[in-house]
Amino acid sequence: MPVKIVTDSTSDIPPALAAQLDITVVPCYVNLDGRSYLDGLELTREAFYTRLPSARPHPTTAAPGQAAFLTAYRALFDRGADAVLSIHVAASLSSIVNAARMAAAEQPDLPVRVVDSGQLSFGIGIQVLAAARAAAQGASLDDLLALLSSLSARTFTFASLTTLEYLRRSGRVSSLRTQLASLLDIRPVMKLHAGKVIMEVARTRRRALERVVSLAASLGPLEAVGFAHANAPEEAAALRERLAPVTAGLPDPVVTTATPAIGAHVGPGAVCAVCLAAEVPGQPSPSTVERIRQTFKSLTG
């Protein structure tokens, strides 16, 4: 059996694509109104975003435990998997990858490799989908690790947030900073690459979206692009339209709704563009580049 792929629900892979490529998605926990829910299984994203603005106390999230990953790995080996590749949210942002590594260490005789994607949301997803497609085509575990090394180095996420309020509620920024941003109509712009988050500010929502477009354009030629939004499909569509000159000729992008595990921190209205920069000549081999191209062609029909 081919190498099987595991990820967590922060990867924001649409369920239909996960099912199509036989990707195992281990859910995070969302704590809302005094109850804990399995992300995507016991709480829909629509229901979460409807309840988010009025939720008191503010929703919190928790990583899947080591046992959840161990159960997922063993189930795949019971089905005949030769190896498992487990790809997760950046370790700088979550403890998820550490839980996955501890689970992998509990079964040293079974080949499980855990990879820190260096990303969040569909920045993980764009790598997971490529790995799953390559695995289905017979790529070995070593081939997949080389592919992910290339992809993670070239994956960039640029996001526009409507407010700092939800980052304040979750303890990520101070109350004073949030108040000043609100008074000045400042919109946060977040950049994520290789596990490092950098925040900029823009005056007005329009300028924030323009900044996301300019950041994407600054990468040069792109291999693929995708979009994630926090219950803001119109904003995602507007961003996609603004990026059209940069993405001309690329496969149709995946557009997905951000998991509650992310939405609880960024708040409704956030939208992001995930960009895969084109391969630098000479790295890696032509076969890997072609696999990437074929992956995204296959994913978009």
Image (cartoon, grey):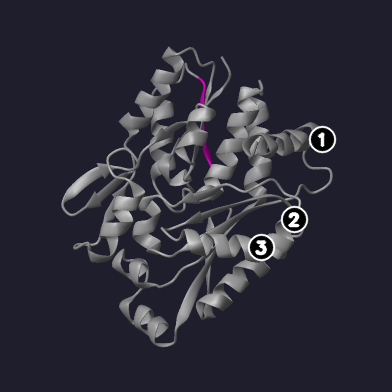
Check disc 1 and report its element: helix, strand or loop: helix
**Residue type at tag 3:** Leu
Look at the numbered disc 2 and give the secondary structure of its residue.
loop
Which residue is at the front of the view, 121 or 237?
A: 237
The dot on residue 158 is none
Question: Mark 1 = which residue?
Answer: 286
Query: Which residue occupies 68% across, 28% down?
Result: 143
Which label sits in the foreground, 1 or 3?
3
How dense is the environment of label 1, judged by Cα within 10 Å: few (below 14), some, or many (20 and up)? few
Which residue does the image show at 42% across and 24% down from the upper left?
73
Q: Secondary structure at mark 3?
A: loop
Q: Which residue is mark 2?
A: 248
In the image, is 160 to the left or to the right of 180? right
Mark 2 Cα-neighbour bin, 10 Å: few <14, some 14–19, many ≥20: few
Q: Which residue is mark 3?
A: 243
Q: Give the amino acid at mark 2.
A: Ala
Q: Residue at x 33, y 57 (%)?
A: 49
Instruction: Name the N-terminal-most of marks 2 and 1.
Output: 2
Amino acid type at image mark 1: Pro
Residue in the picture at 79% in, 31% down: 287
Q: Nearer the viewer, residue 50 or 71?
A: 50
Residue 210 placed where, x, y %? 62, 73
Where is residue 183? Give x, y as percent: 39, 87
Q: Are marks 1 and 3 in contact (CB under 8 Å)?
A: no
Residue 289 vs 227, above or below: the answer is: above
Answer whether labels 3 and 2 touch (C-beta < 8 Å): no
